[in-house]
Image (tube, helix red, strand yellow):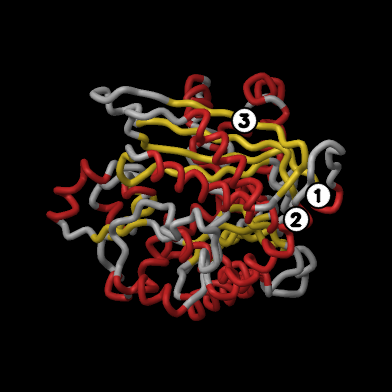
């Protein structure tokens, strides 16, 4: 059996750990630059605030119903996510972190344990230690875990945060209830195709011939059918090394001064370097891009990107910073209002397997001790406490609505950098 631990309205739940008075009140968390709603409390959902709602369009509704809105605090969310993961994984041997607010637990071998009560204890421990409410769906396959988890969230009072799909009767009842568009792996377009063929519930999909499923969805569809039947097709994934690293941001306000844009771009390059060192790899390719706001038709539009292949793979912030600065100089143009920029590094090699050019000086080994010392100090004392002179030290997220509680929390805690996939 697998269990899916899913944090409820995770970003909002994290905000409530800072300010308990937010419990029971409508709360939303906004994206970078406070643009769109990325997390909503149940109370906010009941007011009809949709996910990804542009904040400026709902400003009056926020005011009318006293909806509390907060800028995203990804450092806090990552910190809380790590705590939830640490608590959950202490109960099992094998697990898979699926996203910042979800992880699968492998309950194989728990033959003589009451799995339902075991997962209730996990849920209660997370709530007691971190004050984060979670829902846990238990089933023979990962896809059915998603179904069980949805049932828990739809009927919280009935199941108390944990539900187990462990019999053919329960599975059939759940699939006859679940809309086809809510099946894990079926998007909006595919759901529309399903509707055209008379498939409205997950159970309807199981009644279709395998040849029809193969034609519409390929081998992925056959695996999905087996998963829904309770036949395991998807094992837990081991974390794999990244094939590219990108640090990109939209600016809170459009930037017109060259040095302001340069400082942001160089900072993004430094963050890419830190992540390379974290996974003990070096990059052979660096890309820099800048662009204006494509939605501002009243302003001239410009976007450009440039890539350089490095003779010697590196993860030195100093060397990557120089390359980023040189690339920036080749694409920057005066007279534009810049809204977004970014740095992407890829083509990785392990740090201890670098092949260097015979015709160029290699400074990587000279810089590495300094870089490692800088990383260690930042890990101990907080992000960007030690940095290169070209970095301002200001956060790269546009966030205007940070609460006093969060400022106090930052002073008392060293938070890790957010580095998760979102689904």
Q: Earlier in the sequence, mark 1 or mark 2?
A: 2
Quarter of the image that includes the N terminus: bottom right
Specify the label residue 44 is tagged with: none
Mark 2 element type: loop
Query: Relative to the observer, which residue lies in front, 153 or 10?
Result: 10
Instruction: Estimate the x, y position of residue 252 in percent, counting from the top left.
Output: 33, 46
Q: Residue at x 56, y 34 (%)?
A: 327
Q: Sort mark 2 into few (<14), some (14-19) or many (20+) by Cα contacts within 10 Å.
A: some
Q: Sort mark 3 into few (<14), some (14-19) or many (20+) by Cα contacts within 10 Å.
A: some
Residue 215 is left or right of residue 281, and the answer is left
Q: Earlier in the sequence, mark 3 or mark 1?
A: 3
Q: Residue at x 77, y 41 (%)?
A: 312
Give the CA distance from mark 3 to mark 1.
21 Å
Q: Earlier in the sequence, mark 2 or mark 3?
A: 2
Mark 1 element type: strand
Query: Relative to the observer, which residue lies in front, 164 or 264?
Result: 264
Residue matched to label 2: 280
Residue matched to label 3: 307
- In the displayed structure, 112 sits above or below 13; it is below
Labels 3 & 1 near each other (Cβ < 8 A): no
Instruction: Estimate the x, y position of residue 156 in percent, counting from the top left.
Output: 42, 63
Query: Relative to the observer, which residue lies in front, 123 or 41?
Result: 41
Instruction: Estimate the x, y position of residue 92 in percent, counting from the top left.
Output: 72, 70
Q: Residue at x 52, y 29 (%)?
A: 330
Q: Which numbered mark, 2 or 3, is in the foreground of this view?
A: 3
Instruction: Estimate the x, y position of residue 280 in percent, counting from the top left.
Output: 75, 55
Residue matched to label 1: 350
């Amino acid at each position: 059996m697998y269990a899916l631990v899913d944090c409820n309205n995770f970003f909002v739940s994290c905000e409530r750990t800072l300010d308990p008075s937010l419990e029971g009140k409508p709360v939303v968390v906004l994206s970078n630059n406070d643009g769109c709603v990325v997390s909503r409390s149940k109370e906010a959902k009941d007011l009809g605030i949709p996910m990804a709602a542009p904040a400026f369009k709902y400003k009056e509704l926020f005011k009318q119903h006293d909806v509390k809105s907060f800028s995203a605090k990804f450092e806090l969310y990552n910190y809380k996510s790590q705590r939830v993961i640490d608590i959950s994984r202490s109960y099992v041997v094998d697990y898979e972190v699926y996203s910042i607010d979800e992880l699968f637990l492998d309950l194989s071998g728990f033959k003589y344990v009451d799995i339902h009560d075991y997962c209730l204890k996990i849920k209660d421990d997370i709530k007691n230690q971190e004050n984060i409410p979670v829902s846990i769906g238990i089933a023979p396959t990962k896809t059915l875990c998603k179904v069980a988890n949805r049932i828990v969230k739809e009927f919280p009072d009935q199941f108390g945060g944990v539900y187990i799909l462990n019999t053919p009767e329960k599975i059939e009842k759940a699939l006859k209830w679940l809309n086809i568009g809510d099946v894990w792996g079926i998007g909006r377009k595919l759901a529309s195709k399903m509707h055209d063929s008379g498939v409205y519930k997950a159970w309807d999909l199981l009644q279709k011939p395998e040849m029809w499923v193969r034609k519409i969805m390929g081998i992925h569809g056959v695996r999905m059918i087996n998963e829904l039947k309770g036949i395991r097709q998807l094992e837990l994934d081991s974390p794999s090394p990244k094939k590219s690293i990108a640090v990109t941001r939209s600016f809170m306000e459009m930037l017109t001064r060259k040095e302001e844009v340069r400082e942001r771009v160089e900072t993004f390059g430094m963050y890419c370097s830190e992540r390379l060192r974290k996974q003990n790899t070096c990059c052979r390719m660096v890309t820099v891009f800048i662009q204006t706001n494509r939605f501002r038709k009243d302003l001239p539009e410009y976007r450009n990107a440039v890539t350089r292949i490095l003779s010697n793979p590196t993860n030195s912030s100093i060397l990557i910073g120089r390359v980023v600065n040189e690339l920036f100089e080749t694409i920057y143009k005066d007279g534009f209002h810049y809204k977004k920029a970014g740095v992407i590094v890829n083509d990785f090699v392990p740090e201890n397997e670098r092949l260097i050019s015979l015709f160029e000086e290699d400074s990587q080994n000279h810089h590495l001790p300094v870089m490692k010392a800088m990383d260690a100090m930042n890990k101990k004392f907080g992000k960007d406490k030690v940095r290169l002179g070209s970095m301002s030290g200001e956060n790269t997220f546009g966030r205007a609505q940070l609460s006093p509680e969060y400022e106090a929390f930052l002073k008392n805690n060293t938070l890790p950098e957010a580095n998760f996939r979102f689904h």
